[in-house]
Image (cartoon, grey):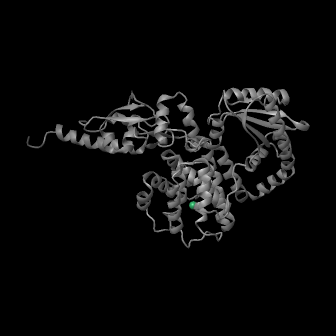
Amino acid sequence: MFHDPIPVEPTIQHLLDTIVAYYPEADLDLVKRAYELAAKSHQNQKRLTGEDFIFHPLRVGLFLAQKQLDIPTIVAGLLHDSLEDTAITLNDIEKLFGHEIAVLVQGVTELDKLKYRGLDRYVENLRKMFVAVANDVRIILIKFADRLHNLETLHGHPKHKQERIAKETLEIYAPIASRLSMGEMKGLLEDLAFPYALPKEYAKTKKIIGEEYPKKEQLVKELEVIIKRELDRAGLKYKSIHGRAKHIYSLYQKLETKDWDISEVHDLMALRIVVENIGDCYTTLGILHQRFKPLKGRIKDYIANPKPNGYQSLHTTVFTLKGEMTELQIRTPAMHAKAEWGVAAHWHYDEYGHAIPGKRYQWVQEINKKLISLKDNAQFLESLKLDIFQNRIFVFTPKGEVIDLPESSTPVDFAYHIHTDIGNRCAGALVNNEIASLDTPLQNGDVVKIIIDKNKKGPNPDWLKFVKTNTARSRIRGLTKKSIFRWMKNVIPKKGA
Ligand code: MN
């Protein structure tokens, strides 16, 4: 399965071995030094489960290494709790491990300050998370790994805390993983939180699974053998074939829509077939349809028509052994990495031990470039946009900073958001490198540059007709009043003049 077993009390050697396996040239010394600092800073600390604290960051690091992430992410994973309740400062981390790692550790620490306090804080939390994602998606990866281990050790917590953490996971973390197209991460988070957040529903689902899963599991094993044989016979080289059980929380959601009739769920088990290239995907589909009759209307070509979040694969539901229906998913290694890791796939090392070159850092700048150069920007950004943010837009400064504004905000709102002075002297705007009028409604993902007129005295009162933010409105009003006052002082002759 996706989540390989991690020893309950791992050692630094486990971590180093895992890293070397996919990245032989890694700077292991850096990893060792991070471990030593973490061990020292958490010395004598225990977790609620009673284990030494150090096993927590170590397991977070191990999880990230199992997912073949880059070294800064793993090092920051080891250090992610070092700023809280220890004598270590951000300055120390920057000095010892450099700026990049310090930024990651700081980002995770900032997110730790967010606590679930009912719906009122929900939107605010989501927004902060999104901004963290936009700053560096690796921050959220570390946070996810942290959360996974916290969920795994939730039994050590008092009941009210279990419930809070589980609900927060289902309502904030999982939707973000989903929006970042990190399907497997979403599934893991939900499955671990499910028993604590919805114990009754969990028990009910579990009971149904108990009866169905062993049956299906056996079937999938037999099927795997047959499919391998068919592909070998056709001379088609596959990369991997593996069965996967539907995540239990996602099964629960589906059962809810199907009146709890499990025979209506066709993807209880699915087989994933990873082949070398797109051509082979279609060939594989052809080969398998000759062997197994497809269910009508269930063939989905998400390669030609990707899902809005960018997901690609061929899906088909076929009648297999004993007339049972099974879903087959056929994809390339790149599609597979993207399905598991979504936007974070860039930080994932490929099978040759290289991260995809040039895409590892400065994610935001990457987005900017894509937004300017690609036609599918809108789609790319749609996949990042959380439902909850539908009335908000995220635009970027030319340096890649994220600015969060209400929908239909204009360059003037943007300018005042940056600085009052920039608003006051704003004379024009470049949106995605093109001249735009100051009342242009900005779109999600726009890169906005404000053109300044140094000689400009103040805002134009006409701007009040189109600005959307209170900041802009109150500044313009304030200054317009002042300038009218100034103007009046000039025109109304002083006494005795
Ligand atoms: Mn932690």
Q: Quadrant of residue 455?
A: top left
Q: Nearer the viewer, residue 480 or 365?
A: 365
Q: Nearer the viewer, residue 125 or 341?
A: 341
Q: Quadrant of residue 16?
A: bottom right
Relative image position of residue 306 (x, y in whole percent): 65, 31
Relative image position of residue 244 (x, y in whole percent): 76, 44
Residue drawn at x 40%, y 60% as measured from the top left? 91
Relative image position of residue 145 (x, y in whole percent): 60, 54
Relative image position of residue 75 (x, y in whole percent): 52, 55
Residue drawn at x 74%, y 48% as measured from the top left? 247
Question: Is 492 situated above or below 42?
Answer: above
Answer left or right for 104 relative to 48.
left
Residue drawn at x 85%, y 49% as measured from the top left? 214
Q: Quadrant of ligand 1?
A: bottom right
Q: Quadrant of the C terminus?
A: top left
Answer left or right for 209 relative to 484.
right
Answer left or right for 227 relative to 71.
right
Question: Is 126 situated above or below 442?
Answer: below
Q: Farthest residue toward the bottom?
A: 44
| Residue 52 appearing in the image | yes
Answer left or right for 144 relative to 217.
left
